[in-house]
Amino acid sequence: MDISSLNLTQVGPGTEVRVSRLECAPTTCQRLREMGFCENALVTKIRGGADLVCWVCGTRVALSARLAKQILVEHVDGRS
Amino acid sequence: MNQDPTKRWVAVIGNPNAGKSTLFNALTGLRQRVGNYPGVTVEKRTGTAYTLHGEAIELIDLPGLYSLSPRSPDEKIAWQVLRGEAPSVPRPDAVLCVVDASNLERNLFLVTQVMELGLPVLVALNMVDMAEARGVRLRPEELSQKLGVPFIPTQAHRGKGLVELRAALGQSRTHPGPRQWTMPPPLAAAVGQIAAAWREWLPAEAHAEGKALELLAGSNSGPEGAKKLARAWRERFSKEAYDWSAAVIHARYEYVRNLLGEAGVMGNKRVASWTDWIDAAVLHPVAGWGVLAVMMLSLFVSIFSIASYPMDWIDAGFTWAGQSLETQMPAGVLRDLLVNGVLAGVGGVVIFLPQILILFFFLGILEDSGYLARAAFLLDRVMHRVGLSGKSFIPLLSSYACAIPGIMATRTVEDPKDRLTTILIAPLMSCSARIPVYTTLTAAAVPVALVPVWGKALGMLGLYALGTGSAFLLAWLFRKKMLGGGSPPLILELPPYRRPALRTVALRMWERAVIFLRRAGTVILALSILLWFLSSFPVRSDDSTETLAGSYAGQLGRWIEPIIRPLGFDWRIGIGLVASLAAREVFVSTMSIVYHVGGEQEGLVAAMQSATWPDGAMIYTPLTCLSLLVFYVYALQCLSTVAVAKRETGGWGWPAFMMLYMTGLAYGAAWLVQIVGRALGFS
C-alpha cells in the first residue's frame, strides 16, 4: 500500500503511527491540529470500529471513522 | 459591571477535563454566583476567592477550551471576556490557567496563546499526583523559568497547593515576556508588517503581534491600516495556498515540545491503565449498550426507591402544617388561601425536590467520573443516523434534568444546524419538572400497592424512551430533511476515569436546590395564589365543588373542554393544562388546588381516582391517564425554555415553531392513544 494513502482506519489497534497529512475541511483540520493531530505528530490507535479511539498528546481522543479516513498516516518505522 | 474598582478580577481558563471547575470550587466554595452572560445562554460563573493577605479577588470561571480560536459560542464568550468585550464583566486583571499536569503538551499550547493577550498569567499545574503516577517527571521551577510565568503544583480534588496558589494570586501582577515561539518566515513577515501598523496607531501596545494574529484570523477590531494589511496578506496566503493557521499551530507545538524537553519534563508515554480495562467493556459495541441501559435503569430506580423517604418526610411536613393551620385558624378566606392555595400549590411541587436532586447527583457523578463522554461516543453512531454527532448527546442528557441547562450545553456543538436541531428536540427529553406529573398520573392510573418499585421504574423508563425515541425521529426530520447538509464528524476527548469530586457534585446539587426552591417560592407561589383566587371566586355556594364549577377557572376550563374532550380530558384537567403552560409541574399543584386536597400527594391521587363525569363514569381511567401522560411527554409547557430558545436562536421564529410542533404533537399523540385504546376495548 502507498504510504501516503494509508489512513488511520487502516492500521490495527495498538499501532503507533505518524500523521502525514490531513484531508478534511479547514475548520475540522484546525480543530484536529489544536487537539494534537498535527502533521508529524505521533498517534497510537487504541480501538478500532465504526468510531475509533486514539492516544495523542497524552490523552484519549475519539474520532468518527469517516474523519479518521481523512487523517493520512505512516508507520513510525517507515514501513508501508 | 465591577462595583468595586479596587477589586481585582481573575479569569480561570483551561482545557476541558483539566480540573478547572474543581479548582474554582476549591478556591471559592459557596461564594459563587451563577448567571448568564447578557444576550447569550452561556453560563456565567463567578466567585470570590481570598489571597493569603485577605484580599478579595473575583474569579471568572470560563468555559473549557482547547484554543483561543473562537468557533463555538462558549469559545466566543471566553474570548470576549479575555479581551474585555463581554457585557457585565470587566476585563480581567490577570489569567489563571489550569493545566492538566499529565497532558502538558496540549495544555501548554493554550497557555502560549493566553500569554499573548497582554495580561499577567499564572499557571496551576493541576493533578500532579495523577501525572506522577503515570511516570511524568514534573519540574515546575524549570517550567516557570523557561516560560516566564509562575507554575504552582496543585491537587484541586484534595485541596493541595491551594495555599501556594492563593499566595501567588496575591502577587500575580507581572506581565509575561515577549513571544518565545518562532514564527515561520512567510508568517513572520506578515505579522511584522501588521504589528508595525498597529504600533503606529498605538505605540504603547506591548502585544501588537498577538493583535496582528487576531487580525489575520479575521478579527475586525483595530486600526484601519492594520486591517487593510491583514486582508492583503490573507489574500496572498490564499493564492499561494499557504496554510498560515496550520503553521502557527505547528510552531506553537514545536515550541512547547522543546520547552518540555529543555525543562526536563519526562514521561507521558502511554501505559495500559485501568481506564483501558473499563473502556474495553464500556465502549464494547454490545456490552457498552448493556452498561448504558444498567446506568439509566439504576438512575430511575434510585429516583423512586431512595427519594421516597425524604419525599414522605416533606409530605408529612406539609400535611402537619395544613392540619395545624386548620386547627389553629378560624375558617375563612385567609385559612383557605393558606391551606388550599399556598400549601397545596407550593407543597405539591417542593415534594419532588429529592427526585430532582438525585437526578442531578447521578448526572454529576457520570460527568465527573468520565463516563458521560463514553456514552456520547457510544451514541455517536445512532446520532449520526439522524444527522447529528455524539456531541449532541450531552446537551440531550442534561435535558433530562432540565431543558434550560440542556439548551445551554448546546454551546459546545460547533455546527450551527446541529445546534439548532439539538435545541429544537431538547425539550422532548423528559425533564425533572415532568417527574411530578408522571408520578402523580401513574399513581392515579394504577393502584400504588399493586406496582413494585422496579415496575414503576420501568413505566417511567417507557415514558422517557417515548420522548427520547420521538426526539431522534424528529432530529432526523429536522436535520436531514428540513435543514439539510451533512453532520460534522466526531472529535471528542475521553478523559481518564476519575473518582468524582463529591464536593463539586454537592455544590451543583445545592445550586439546583436553591434555583428550584426559589422558583417554588416565587413563580409557583404566585401562580398558586392566582389559581386559588380563580378557582375560589366568585363564591356561589358553600359547596367547594359547586364553587369551583362556577369559578373563573371553572369557566375557563369549560370553555376549552370541547377542544380537549376528544383526548378524554374534562374541564378540571383543562384548568391544569392552561395553568401549567408556564411550567409543567404546576399541573400537580393546580390539581391539588382544584380538588382541595392540601399539599399531600396521596390525597390528590385519591381525589383523582374518585373524580367522575356527570354520568358517574370515572375520569382518570388508565386510558385517560395514559393519554394525559403522552400529552405531557410531548407538550412544551415551560415558558423558561421558550425564553432560553429565543435568546439562543436570536429571535421568536424557532421558539414559535418549537411551541407549535410540540403542542400539535402532544394533542395528536394523546388523541391517537384515545382512538387506539377505545378500539382495543378500553374506556
Image: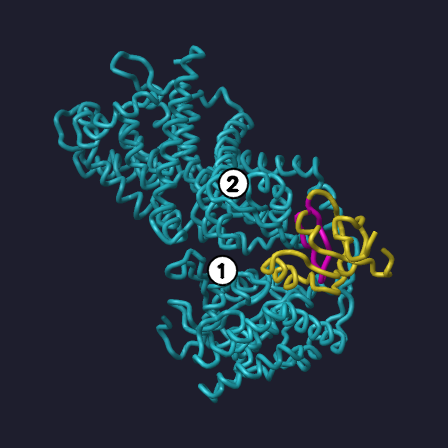
Chain colours: A yellow, B cyan
Numbered circles on residues, count: 2
Query: Dot 2: within a 10 Å radius of its alpha carbon, few (fewer than 14), some, or many (20 or more) residues?
Result: some
Disc 1 residue type?
A: Asp
Q: Earlier in the sequence, mark 2 or mark 1?
A: 1
Horizontal relation, residue B320 to residue B405: left or right: left
Residue drawn 58% across the image and 46% down it: B389
- Along the line of sight, which residue is nearer the eye, B671 or B272? B671
Q: Which residue is mark 2?
A: B480
Q: Nearer the viewer, residue B25 or B17?
A: B17
> Magenta residues?
A51-65
**Residue at 36% from the left image edge and 70% from the top image edge:** B1
Instruction: Give the camera-side residue of B470 and B614.
Output: B470
Give x and y (percent) for residue B44: 44, 61
Label 1: chain letter:
B
The numbered dot on residue B74 is: 1
Local secondary structure at mark 2: helix
What residue is rendered at 44% in x and 80% in y? Answer: B223
What residue type is disc 2 on?
Answer: Lys
SS class, disc 1:
helix
The answer to which of B151 and B147 lies nearer the viewer is B147
